[in-house]
Image: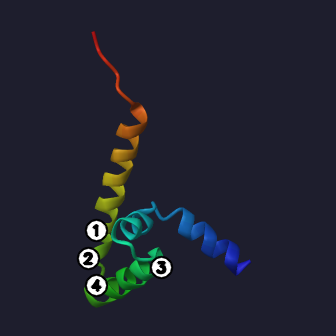
Amino acid sequence: MLTKIKDRIEKSGFGVCQYFGTKVGISSWTIRKYFIYASFITVGSPVILYLIAAFWLDIKRHLRNRGNIIVD
């Protein structure tokens, strides 16, 4: 049951850590771990950066899925 909860949380985490992990070549678990450490040290300010990155990735995904539409 704990594994199901962990998998659900990882899938619903916007994919920001996975995206940065594939770009840099580091596992997403390592990025998540350092993100959590940074959040504790700086009292949560990386959470704002995480949400901005999630929003930006979501916008990029929508623009990419929209395709090339030519308006006459």
Name the front one of labels 3 and 2.
3
Q: Measure how far apart labels 2 and 4 are at the Cα level.
A: 6 Å
Q: Disc 1 vs disc 3: which is toward the camera?
A: 3
Q: Which mark is residue 29?
A: 3
Q: Position of residue 18 (x, y in %)?
A: 44, 67
What crowding class fits label 3: few (fewer than 14 Cα within 10 Å), some (14-19), or many (20 or more)? few
- Name the amino acid type tagged 3: Trp
Q: Amino acid at mark 1?
A: Ile
Q: Name the amino acid, label 2.
A: Ser
Spatial CA distance of label 4 from label 3 is 21 Å
Most extreme residue toward the front is: 25
Numbered tag placed on residue 43 in the rendering: 4
* Quadrant where the C terminus is found in the figure: top left
Number of the label disc, if any, that sits on residue 48: 1
Residue 50: x and y in percent read 33, 67
Residue 66's x, y, as percent?
40, 32
Q: Camera-side residue: 68 or 47?
A: 68
Res 1 quadrant in image: bottom right
The reply to whether the C-beta atoms of the residues labelled 2 and 4 are less than 8 Å apart is yes
